[in-house]
Image (spheres, helix red, strand yellow):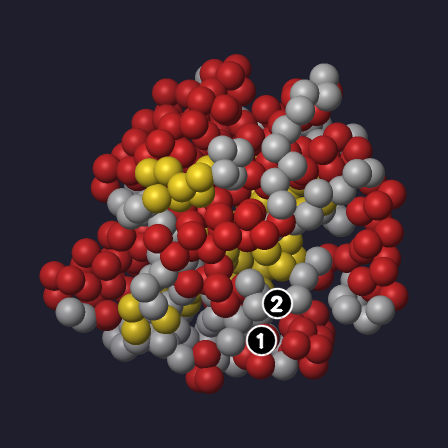
Amino acid sequence: MVSLAEDFTIGVEEEYQIINPVTRELCSRQQQILQIAEKVLGEEVQPEVYLSQIEIGTPVCKTLAEVRAEIVRLRQEVIAAAAKDGNQIAAAGTHSFSSWSEQEITPKERYQGLMRDYQQLTREQMIFGCHVHVGISDPQLALCVMNRARVWLAPLLALAASSPFWMGMDTGYASYRTEIWGRWPISGPPLIFESLAEYQALAEALIATGSVEEATKIYWDARLSERYPTVEFRVTDVCMTVDEAVMVAGLVRALARTCYEQAKIDEPFPAARHEVIRAAHWRAARYGLDTELIDVEAMRAVPAQELLEKFLAFVRPSLEEYGDWDEISSLVQQTMQHGNGATRQREVYKRTERLEDVVDFIVAQTAKGIT
């Protein structure tokens, strides 16, 4: 097995919806599906906050080809386990119409603790994300990567946005999951830290003040993992298709590598104010790829395609070094041409005016390319 301490390895976690194929609503069959899936996947499949959610985590991967193969394998097995239980699996940042009030919290201490501490925020946590871990063994350099990567998180969010509907309504957002998640007290874009000691002191202060129970509950969009020697990127909705998940993983790894190399030679980077970064994230969540995004470095609004081309140019040397440029640049162009998950869901609803059809579309997209 690849060492967790090896630099620039990749691990991907995806949170899925469990769908009743008749009503298309979320259904609380996590424990039954876990019993089936664990026989094949072991700890690669896990519970999540709600009993209508299930999470997978890939093994540590060295290449994007490995990432693709593992996501395909894990989706296949979870979909098969759900089918044996008479249900389906869907990958999107929110469910189109199910109500949070009808969901059951998973009876596990971690999630019950979240319920005790955060109350209504936990009750409404009916959202589904994708987390990408990039191995960086030196924690000081990992922190430098986090500092430098923060200005590029918004275009990642716009590319992967897949949560336009909430409680039966079109929210007007491409990633309404981002807005639900952003209400949590220690969430959203990370700050800039001058040193690892400063980062650790803040974490200790948040724990000492009772703001968080432990450092794993600091939920920034990029953070230093407490469990692994990685930078964990948590900014995007779960991707509907395998292709999109591979695209996000490839971009994240290339971003981390680019920032790492620049940090080693102490190359200057834009130390944008937190307010501007937050505004950039809000705009990416609101509009996705449909209009202008904020170029944080230039401090101006630019067409989404222009910012994505700038992002690709920034990470191109790293993508080329890994042999990933052709695949990732092509997947980004496809997403720009055909729309992110949010755009494609809205197109289905515009045609049929049935949110059940949107759920069917997401189920089909989740299984696309895995057979």
Whether 255 is drawn above or below 24: the answer is: above
Q: Residue visible at 59% across and 44% down?
A: 233
Q: Secondary structure at mark 2?
A: loop
Give the residue type that dot 1 points to.
Answer: Leu
Contact between marks 2 and 1 (CB within 8 A): the answer is: yes
Whether 229 is drawn above or below 90: the answer is: above
Whether residue 276 sits left or right of residue 295 in the image: it is right
Q: Is residue 261 visible?
A: yes
Quadrant in the picture for the C terminus: top left
Q: Residue visible at 32% across and 51% down?
A: 341
Residue bearing mark 2? 184
The x, y position of residue 187, in whole percent, is 62, 59
Give the residue type that dot 2 points to.
Answer: Trp
How packed is label 1: few (under 14 Cα within 10 Å), some, or many (20 or more)? some
Q: Residue visible at 12% across and 66% down?
A: 352
Q: Residue visible at 67% across and 33% down?
A: 145
Q: Nearer the viewer, residue 298 or 117?
A: 298
Residue at the extreme left:
351
Q: Quadrant of residue 106?
A: bottom right
Q: Quadrant of residue 134?
A: top right
Whether residue 129 sits left or right of residue 352 in the image: it is right
Quadrant in the picture for the N terminus: top right
The x, y position of residue 225, in whole percent, is 71, 46
Disc on res. 77: none
Residue bearing mark 1? 121
